[in-house]
Amino acid sequence: MGGGNHNKEVEEKTATRGQSDVNKRLKYVSLVVLVFQNASLILSIRYVRTLPGERFFTTSAVVMAELLKVLTCLLIILLQKRREDTGEGIGEETCEGTGEETGEETCEGTGEETGEETGEETGEETGEETGEETGEETGEETGEETGEETGRRRVRRQERRQERRQERRQARRQARRQARRQARRQERRQERRQVRRQERRQERRQERRQVRRQVRRQVRGQVRGQERRQERRQERRQERGQERRHVRGQVRRQERGQVRRHVRRQVRRQVRRQERRQERRQVRRHVRRQEKRHVRRQEKRQVRRQERRQVRRQERRQVRRHVRRQVRRQERRQVRRHVRRQERDR
């Protein structure tokens, strides 16, 4: 008895610790996922609204996001239920093979508790290991004494299960109610927005109609005024045309005389320009010839100067060579004389 209770307490402590660690991790993971989801939703809606083409209502995007949230929550709840059911079934199956009543009862208790608290992993591992060990030990040691305790434990477990089921049902109901409320709110918001949009559209249409009417009236008045002005202008033009024709006849006569005079003057100017151009061309040709002659003379002078310089350089070279030869001859003579003197002295 003492060993079985101690094992149960240890298992419960380990299960609670594992649950606390898992809960902490789930908190942080859920926080990160929610932040990423909300930020991506806002940015994606903003980006899609900036693109060209037909636009959708932002409320429809929000409704779809909420529906996806509800569906994911329901799927997660169903998966948790299945895991709990599989954990309980595994704990009972592993404990049935002991062949003793007390072993079966203690195995069922441990398998159910661990399967409900820790899920598939902890339910399978602890249900199989502790079921076989505690089933054999308590079946041999205890016996009839544990009957009453196991009955009480069964009752307590059943009560706990019922409480958990009720809590889950309440949570589901609350989630459904919240989803319905949110859907209704979103529908109402959409309806209000649609009504507001329709009212705005009607106001805009009325304003446009009024503006069009005013514009049409203004255009009609302007057209009528223009027609009257055109009639007056035509009458004035006809009167002015008659006067201008009489004046134009006189002006044309004068212009013809002026044109003739102007043509004569231009002819005289052109003749003078041609004469001047011919004179300039002759002067330019004379200047070019003189420049060419001057250039040729300079080139000839440069060539002569270069030839003279070359001749002078050659003469200088020859003089230098001659001087060097004479100096060398004198040195040789002196050396010979010195050598002869030395030989005589010897």
Image (cartoon, rainbow, N blue to C red):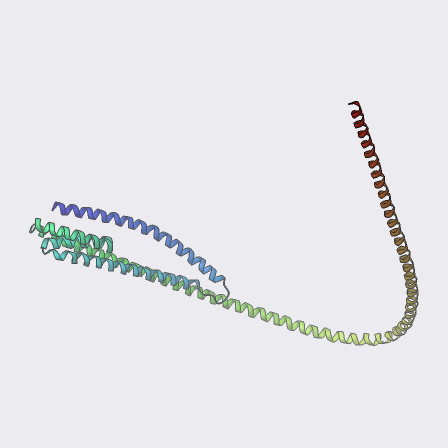
Q: Is residue 219 at least partly visible in the picture?
A: yes
* 69, above or below 331, in the image: below
Would you place residue 31 above or below residue 243 in this image? above
Please state which of residues 106 and 240 is positioned toward the viewer in this rendering.
Answer: 106
The answer to whether residue 155 shows anywhere in this view is no
**Residue 322 image position (x, y, % from top left):** 84, 38
Residue farthest along the left direction in this orientation: 144
Q: Nearer the viewer, residue 165 or 207?
A: 165
Q: Is residue 133 above or below residue 235?
A: above
Q: Residue 28's spot in the image, x, y percent? A: 34, 50
Question: Horizontally, is 250 left or right of 61 in the view?
Answer: right
Which quadrant holds residue 192?
A: bottom left
Classify residue 313 by image quadrant. top right
Task: Tell me which corner region of the image, top left, top right, bottom left or bottom right, holds residue 97.
Answer: bottom left
Looking at the image, which residue is at 61% across and 72% down?
A: 216
Split into 4 quadrants, where in the image is the C terminus?
Answer: top right
